[in-house]
Amino acid sequence: MIDFIVVGSGLGGIAFCEQLVRNNHSFVVFDDNSQQSSNIAAGMYNPVIFKRYTSVWKAQEQLNMLHPFYHSLENKLSVKLDYRQSIYRRFFSVEEQNSWFEAADKPNLQPFLSTTLIKDSIEGIVSDYGFGQVKEGGWIHTNLLQKRYLDHLNTLGKLKEERFDYAALDIQAGMVVYKGLQAKYIVFCEGFGLNSNPFFNYLPLVGTKGEVLEIEVPGLKIDMIIKASVFLLPLGEEKYKVGATYKWKDKTNVPTEASRIELEEKLRTFLKRPYKVLNHLAGVRPTVTDRHPLLGKHPKHDRLFVLNGLGSRGVMLAPYLSKLLFEYITKETPLDREINIERFLKKFKLRPF
């Protein structure tokens, strides 16, 4: 018997596996590569929500774990993953400048927002009103992380590259059995694929499709992330990622012409250099109706757990949430109500489990 079956190898699944490794638990991962959100994501981490000028939930706690977590993976996988880069918020008006500096006085935002207006011109970038700097930003190379981590699991014999058959899961007293494989627990980290999971598809995971472009801009040399109506994130060698769109009706991983046009139109409002589109990618983010993650135990089956709903902030949330869920399972450490799936039990109390 092994300790855990993990279903899904996106950011949440990888982070939970790392908790198991650090605590000497045995496990096997099932993944069929059906979910693309983690490997197409820009992987940006930003502790500030620009739309409302508020800090991300538990931002400092997440950042405290982020760098050590990805640094350990860099060492394990012998690859560069964590790129610390300032985020330059491009201002559209004097009023927006004023809003920035008002926000920078808030205690929870002071560690993240610079109070210095950046007036330096950047060749090729329109910035009539300057920039505000986020000091704790950067990005994680999520696509490379996922590829290398799956190779690592495969080498260790811990990866099953196949679709998980829910009907084959036999839930017994004190364990689960899947096609002859016995485990103490099973954790579902399936991203938007959770909607096909008969054990947890009652949860309000709505999903938001996002599309990004990879472009080449000859002569543009910036070492910061520009955030305007879209972001422009430097990948090196004059290549950049541009994004992202937010679509709520289309739940496919297929890039669309309409989104490409939208991204390019927004990009051209501030990028005044010729560029070439190299790639166009799409995936469905695992977003939740109340904008909080989904962690916890199935209301009937106490060996079944879920880690989901990381939305567009997976690189920050995954290390933090995986530790919380691991301690919830192994030490019965309570989960905050705002992330515990028990918050939906009353709403769905009439549903038979």
Image: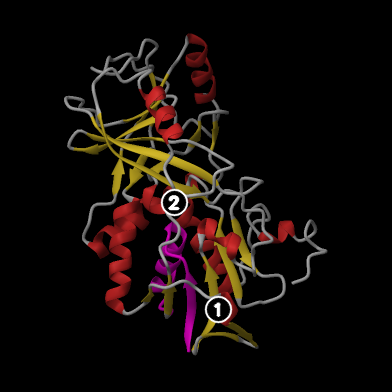
Q: Quadrant of residue 331?
A: bottom right
**Residue at the location (50% across, 48% down)?**
285
Residue at 38%, 18% in the rendered image: 269
Q: Against 320, is 91 above or below? A: above
Residue drawn where x is 30% and y is 31% of the image: 224
Q: Image height check: is 6 above or below 106?
A: below
Q: Which of 129/270 is in front?
A: 270
The residue that mark 1 highlights is 185
Amino acid of disc 2: Ser
- Tell me the residue at 46%/56% (across/down): 318
Q: Position of residue 265 (x, y in %)?
A: 40, 23
Residue 255: image x %, image y %? 42, 42
> Residue under circle 2?
37
Q: Which residues are magenta?
A: 1-25
Q: How is the image coloured?
A: secondary structure
User: How far from the left and from the top, in percent, is residue 344?
Assistant: 73, 57
Residue 342 showing in the rendered view: yes
As helix, strand or loop, the secondary structure at mark 1 comes to strand
Query: Is residue 8 in the magenta section?
Result: yes
Q: Residues within 10 Å of mark 1 (few under 14, many from 20)?
A: many
Magenta span includes 329: no
Instruction: Give the mark nearest the N terminus, 2 or 1.
Output: 2
Displayed quadrant of residue 184? bottom right
Return the mark for residue 123.
Answer: none
- The amino acid on which the numbered mark 1 sits, given as a three-letter code, is Tyr
Marks 2 and 1: which is nearer the front? Answer: 2
Image quadrant in which the C terminus is located: bottom right
Q: Is residue 160 left or right of residue 324?
A: left
